[in-house]
Amino acid sequence: MNFMQQSSAQIKLKYLALALVTVFFLQGCSSDGSPRFKDIEEIEVSESTKGVICEVEEVEPGNEFKVIEEQVIDDKMASMAIVHNLDGTVDSVSLHKMKNDESSYHRASVMRPFLMGTLAGTFFNRNMNRHSLDPSRYKSTDAFNKSKGMRSGIANSATTRRMKVPGKGSRGYGKGKSFRSFGG
């Protein structure tokens, strides 16, 4: 009889523990089951609708390039980089294929990060508000200034939308109390 009572007590204890764990996890979720953020920020995202043809020149053997000229085009999907190599060959690389890791260009992994600091970087960056030009990536001050002037034309034709993102209190490990980490 004592064995049955102990077994019944253990079963009740297990159900109680299960109920507590369930309540603990449900308190951290919204009604649709997704994690609840401490605060929600609404940001404005501007995305380019125009494309860019970026002409670059290899200046050091291997992986150092400089922008010769950039040109804005209406068809964003036709965006490309034209690469003048030191050996005299010229490569044309689709930015769309490079973005989707479909490019067969052997230096795509080097070219994409380089292009992020140029006008062509607006193709990869979905938020133009966080994109800036790096003058060190241009062969001349004139090339940089020309691209800088064209950037405002791309920005003026960009589509803008509002987007909700996790607030500052919801980012990073250990930022406040959470069931998802032990840091806070």
Image: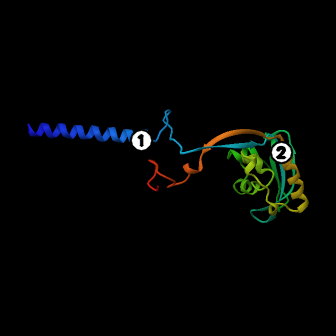
Mark 2 residue crowding within 10 angstroms, few (<14) / some (14–19) / many (20+) = many
Which residue occupies the extreme right position in the image? 142
Residue 6's place in the image compared with 145, above or below, is: above
* Residue occupied by mark 2: 154
* Res 2 quadrant in image: top left
- Identified at 38% across, 39% down, the residue is 23
The secondary structure type at the circle numbered 1 is helix
Q: Nearer the viewer, mark 2 or mark 1?
A: 1
Q: In the image, 70: left or right of 8? A: right
Residue 34 screen position, x and y as percent: 51, 38
- For the N terminus, the quadrant is top left
Residue 117 seen in render: yes
Give the amino acid at mark 2: Ile
- Identified at 66% across, 40% down, the residue is 163
Residue 8 screen position, x and y as percent: 18, 36
The mark that comes first in sequence, 2 or 1, is 1
Q: CA distance from mark 2 to mark 1?
A: 46 Å
Give the amino acid at mark 1: Phe
Of residue 89 and residue 140, the one placed in the foreground of this image is 140
Which residue occupies the extreme top position in the image? 32
Q: Which mark is residue 25?
A: 1
- Identified at 59% across, 47% down, the residue is 167
Of residue 110 and residue 126, the one placed in the foreground of this image is 126
Count numbered badges in the picture. 2
